Image (cartoon, coloured by chain):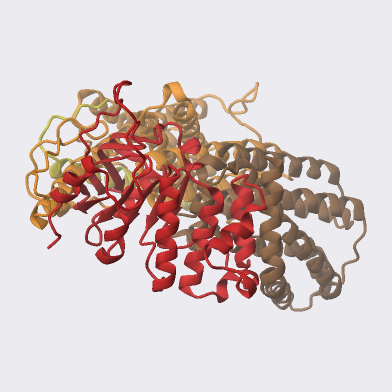
Chain colours: A yellow, B orange, C red, D brown
């Protein structure tokens, strides 16, 4: 396994995971502070 | 490689999330272990399973943003949906753009020995990344939802035009980047490598879709947060005038239904407690 | 006679903060209305909504027979707005500022000297760069720029601020003359004294809402109704007096 | 529309004539930027000659940013923007007027900077036709994009820092193409300079058309 290959995969995977988690965290934070009305995804 | 559990409320996005994870797992497994090293590039070929897919998703993101902006600008089609889709596409696109630059420069370091080359395709992606940062910064700077949507859709169109013209400009620029390996008529990639590459496109494509859906939903929630916050602020403002006790006649303020929100639901603890991280 | 301004439950936003939280107001052509109220009551926002510069988030607004949200550009060219700031170019002289305002409003250049004289700006003052003028003089140059544009709706935010007694009288005379000529004047002001004598009607604003703004006159008066005499200079037209009486003195 | 453009351009240039900001501040600033570039390359003559077009256009980009910011502080300083919004001037006319004023000032600066690179970087100005043509077209592009984005960020809270961030990537292709065209003109690189001029024309057309169509909305209060 080559160092560069690992670096590329890890950095790319890490970046995307971080962004996904950030979006989910913000979504959960918003949903908790809104009233419990069922969200209709238009 | 991705341990994120994918909680989401509706069945469809959960399915989308899990299938994205599955496809990416297969891509990782095939890409790193199963497929043979390339006769020319040796181990570096494994980056082939990340970089092109991520780059394609980057352009897909800005494509979604440009199309949604056109739809928003079209008088008949205008609706907040397009604006939310535009920002979702742009933000996810800029993340993939960052990933593209990252993997691209690592690949450059590996095969050409230098982190950054003034290669046509890299310059174009860098300009696109800078434009997207400008777009996102601009959206954060404008409060009024209507003019924010209007201004950002115009900027998005300008971005798309600039990218298209850049594309031809960079063709005359000396390019070290080897041509489209996959789309060329006789692909120089075959067997395991081709299979892994296709799976990588599938995996990152599903991930891209999943991210856009969630980012879109985040925008919907944010808008509802704004509307509820507004109703809260409206009541506070009205109380201000009643406390001042200025008017002889009782003011009969019919609470106007503002924008899309139905009558604002009863508010629990002051929403300001959980200010969303912008 | 048609109302020149009719606002019903108008809501205007600055981001999420409601500048106006349901304002109602009626103004008739030829009438001078003064808006009173504490800072932050929404007076400036109300003027800007009537000028078609601020988005009406909710409620109905009809100004000079036009809807500010639909035909804003047509409305704006008939409106004159004097905000807290004068809107002058510091490097241009008083005359050049007014000249630019005239040509921008497609008015003849010849009306510029008359407008300047009307505000007591003549002789040396005319060719002094705006930057070197005093606050009162700048105010008068801004007013001259408005005179030269001949708007049908005059919106003034604290017009008397910075003017000495002599020029306040000049301003009052100007506003009365303009109102008598059929234009509509709405001004926001803190000084009760100055505007007491001038205004036909006073309304109070607080918390983004207006008290006593609504006239019981329907928007479309039946044709048979005779056109009420144009409000004479000082004597408040009889049917308006009850409105004024209703407004309690501001604590 | 054209009459409005002439009126607005006349007004801006008149103010510039009286205040002389471009001449007294932006001009010297641009020359200092050139000097700094010179120091950065510490008298490595052949490299300086090679880099002269690029440095020239970077200096133009920076001074263009300043000229555009100056052009809109005129309007926002005392709230003259409301006057423009309430006037009968067509937004497209205002846009073309302001762009023309900024463009004129930039052309004067470019002449100054051209003298600068001849003196400081010892480059001889050959191929004058291509030089002038590409300078003219790229100045149109820079001022069009500059004025459009400045109007867009006029009402915003963070406009001083947002404008450069928004404008730099938009102007990057213009600076790139102009540099290439100048390198060909100065004989520093082979290739067809006129094709770069075509590309410059493309960008200038996009930004001018974009500005004319969208300026009404851009001037609205955000």
**Whole-percent x, y for residue D51 in the image:** 77, 64
Residue D12 coordinates in the image, percent (x, y):
66, 59
* Residue B93 visible in the current orientation: yes
Q: Position of residue C9 (x, y in %)?
A: 23, 37
How many marks on residues?
0
Instruction: Say whether residue B210 is left or right of residue B161.
Output: left
Indicate the quadrant where residue C38 lies.
bottom left
Residue C19 % position (x, y): 27, 50
Please give the name of the residue rendered at 52% of the width and 64% of the height, measured from the top-left corner.
C119
Q: Does C34 sit above or below residue D207?
A: below
Q: Quadrant of the N terminus of chain B?
A: top left
Please indicate whether residue D18 sits to the left or right of residue A32 in the image: right
Q: Position of D122 compared to B186: left or right?
A: right
Residue B172 visible in the shown view = no
Q: Nearer the viewer, residue B159 or B11?
A: B159
Q: Quadrant of residue C30?
A: top left
Task: Name the residue nearer the viewer: B31 or D25.
Answer: D25
- In the rendered view, tell whether residue B154 sits above or below residue D38: above
From the viewer's perspective, tell me whether residue D209 is left or right of residue D188: left
Q: Residue at x 62, y 56 (%)?
A: C112
Q: Nearer the viewer, residue B214 or B241?
A: B241
Rendered view: C197 above or below D113: above
Query: Which one is in front, C103 or D12?
Result: C103
């Amino acid at each position: 396994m080559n160092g560069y290959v690992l670096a590329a995969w890890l950095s790319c995977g890490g970046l995307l995971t971080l962004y996904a988690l950030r979006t989910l965290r913000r979504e959960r934070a918003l949903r908790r502070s809104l009233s419990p009305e069922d969200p209709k995804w238009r | 490689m991705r341990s994120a559990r994918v909680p989401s409320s509706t069945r469809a996005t959960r399915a989308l999330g899990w299938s994205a994870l599955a496809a990416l797992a297969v891509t990782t497994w095939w890409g790193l272990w199963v497929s043979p090293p390339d006769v020319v590039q040796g181990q570096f070929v494994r980056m082939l399973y990340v970089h092109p897919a991520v780059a394609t998703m980057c352009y897909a993101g800005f494509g979604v943003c440009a199309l949604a902006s056109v739809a928003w600008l079209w008088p008949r089609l205008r609706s907040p949906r397009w604006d939310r889709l535009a920002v979702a596409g742009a933000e996810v696109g800029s993340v993939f753009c960052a990933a593209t630059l990252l993997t691209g420069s690592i690949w450059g370091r590996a095969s050409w020995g230098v982190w950054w080359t003034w290669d046509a395709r890299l310059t174009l992606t860098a300009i696109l990344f800078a434009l997207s940062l400008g777009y996102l910064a601009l959206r954060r700077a404008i409060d009024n939802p209507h003019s924010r949507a209007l201004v950002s859709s115009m900027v998005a169109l300008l971005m798309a035009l600039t990218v298209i013209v850049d594309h031809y400009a960079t063709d005359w620029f000396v390019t070290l980047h080897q041509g489209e390996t996959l789309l060329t008529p006789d692909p120089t990639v075959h067997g395991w490598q081709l299979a892994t590459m296709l799976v990588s496109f599938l995996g990152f494509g599903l991930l891209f879709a999943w991210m856009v859906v969630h980012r879109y939903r985040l925008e919907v929630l944010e808008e509802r947060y704004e509307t509820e916050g507004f109703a809260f602020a409206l009541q506070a403002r009205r109380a201000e005038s009643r406390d001042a006790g200025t008017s002889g006649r009782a003011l009969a303020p019919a609470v106007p239904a503002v924008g899309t929100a139905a009558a604002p639901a009863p508010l629990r603890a002051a929403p300001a407690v959980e200010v969303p991280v912008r | 006679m048609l109302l020149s301004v009719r606002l019903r439950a108008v809501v205007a936003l600055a981001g999420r903060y409601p500048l106006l939280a349901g304002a109602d107001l009626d103004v008739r052509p030829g009438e001078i209305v003064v808006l009173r109220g504490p800072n932050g009551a929404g007076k400036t926002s109300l003027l800007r909504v009537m000028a078609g510069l601020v988005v009406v988030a909710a409620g109905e607004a009809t100004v000079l027979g036009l809807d500010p949200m639909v035909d804003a550009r047509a409305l704006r060219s008939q409106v004159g707005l004097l905000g807290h700031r004068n809107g002058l170019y510091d490097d241009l002289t008083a005359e050049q500022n007014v000249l630019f305002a005239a040509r921008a409003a497609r008015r003849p250049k010849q009306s510029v000297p008359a407008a300047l004289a009307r505000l007591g700006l003549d002789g040396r003052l005319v060719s002094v760069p705006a930057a070197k003028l005093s606050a009162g003089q700048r105010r008068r140059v801004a007013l001259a720029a408005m005179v030269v544009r001949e708007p049908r709706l005059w919106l003034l935010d604290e017009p008397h601020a910075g003017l000495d007694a002599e020029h306040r009288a000049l301003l009052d005379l100007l506003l009365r003359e303009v109102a008598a000529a059929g234009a509509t004047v709405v001004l926001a002001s803190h000084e009760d004294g100055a505007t007491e004598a001038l205004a036909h009607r006073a309304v109070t604003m607080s918390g983004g809402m207006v008290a006593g703004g609504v006239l019981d006159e329907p928007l479309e008066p039946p044709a048979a109704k005779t056109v009420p005499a144009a409000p004479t200079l000082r004597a408040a037209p009889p049917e308006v007096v009850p409105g004024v009486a209703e407004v309690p003195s501001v604590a | 529309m054209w009459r409005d453009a002439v009126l607005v351009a006349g007004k801006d240039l008149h103010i510039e004539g009286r205040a002389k900001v471009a001449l007294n501040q932006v001009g010297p600033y641009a020359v200092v930027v050139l000097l700094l570039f010179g120091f950065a390359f510490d008298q490595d003559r052949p490299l300086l000659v090679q880099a002269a077009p690029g440095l020239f256009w970077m200096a133009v980009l920076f001074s263009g940013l300043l000229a555009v910011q100056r052009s809109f502080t005129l309007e926002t300083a005392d709230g003259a923007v409301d006057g423009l919004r309430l006037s009968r001037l067509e937004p497209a006319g205002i846009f073309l007027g302001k762009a023309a004023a900024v463009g004129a000032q930039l052309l004067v600066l470019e002449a100054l900077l051209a003298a600068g690179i001849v003196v400081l970087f010892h480059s001889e100005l050959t191929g004058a036709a291509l030089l002038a043509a590409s300078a003219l077209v790229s100045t149109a592009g820079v001022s069009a994009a500059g004025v459009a984005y400045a109007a867009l960020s006029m009402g915003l809270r963070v406009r001083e820092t947002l404008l450069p961030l928004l404008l730099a990537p938009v102007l990057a292709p213009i600076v790139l193409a102009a540099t290439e065209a100048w390198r060909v003109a100065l004989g520093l690189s082979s290739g067809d300079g006129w094709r770069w001029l075509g590309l410059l024309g493309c960008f200038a057309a996009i930004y001018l058309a974009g500005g004319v169509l969208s300026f009404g909305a851009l001037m609205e209060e955000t």
